[in-house]
Amino acid sequence: MYDEIILSKLFTCLEHIEAIEKYFEKAKGPEQFFKLGDGLNYDATLMRLQALGENLKRISQKHSAVISDLNYAEIDTVIRFRDYVSHHYEQLEHELIFEICYKKIPQLKYCLLNLTKKDNSKDSSS
């Protein structure tokens, strides 16, 4: 069972993902996604990806068992991507961001939901 702080961080990760999904939902392809809302959806998505990576990085530094329990094979990539957004913003390709939102974010969300559901079910059975 995780403490309140860890659960709060996990739910914050889910909030970032839900915001990304909202910004991304009308995109039919990388070019359209890049232009949605005059580019603001794209920028907002990058900020949420950065914040998501930062949250997961902090969890991994202090609670590595939680990251193992998450059971998401590409977690290190998500964490490193945060640094890439921070330091190489102008070099990002919108095709890559589209692919991350389309394929990787739903997988990560699934793992986070499973982890938080498992923890909540442990909590309620005590």
Image: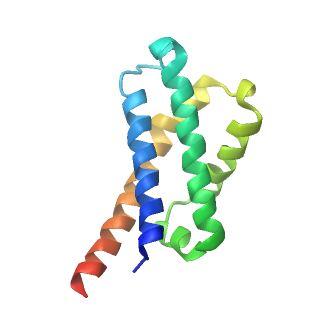
Q: Quadrant of the N terminus?
A: bottom left
Indicate whether 113 appears above or below 84: below
Q: Who's the residue at 72% across and 45% down the image?
A: 83
Tell how many labels. Answer: 0
Residue 107 position in % (x across, y down): 43, 50
At 69% from the left and 50% from the top, the residue drawn is 80
Q: Residue at x 43, y 44 (%)?
A: 17
Residue 126 in view here: yes
Residue 27 vs residue 41, the one in the foreground: 41
Q: Residue furthest left?
A: 125
Q: Residue furthest front?
A: 5
Quadrant for the C terminus in the image:
bottom left
Snapshot colouring: rainbow
Residue at horizontal 56%, vertical 60%? Answer: 73
**Left or right of 54 in this view: 4:** left
Inspect this view and state whether residue 34 appears: no
Residue 22 drawn at (x, y percent): 37, 32
Residue 13, x across and y down, in percent = 46, 52
Instruction: Look at the picture and state if 34 lies above or below 102.
Output: above
Pick the front one: 2 or 30? 2
* Residue 28 image offset from top left, x and y in percent: 41, 19
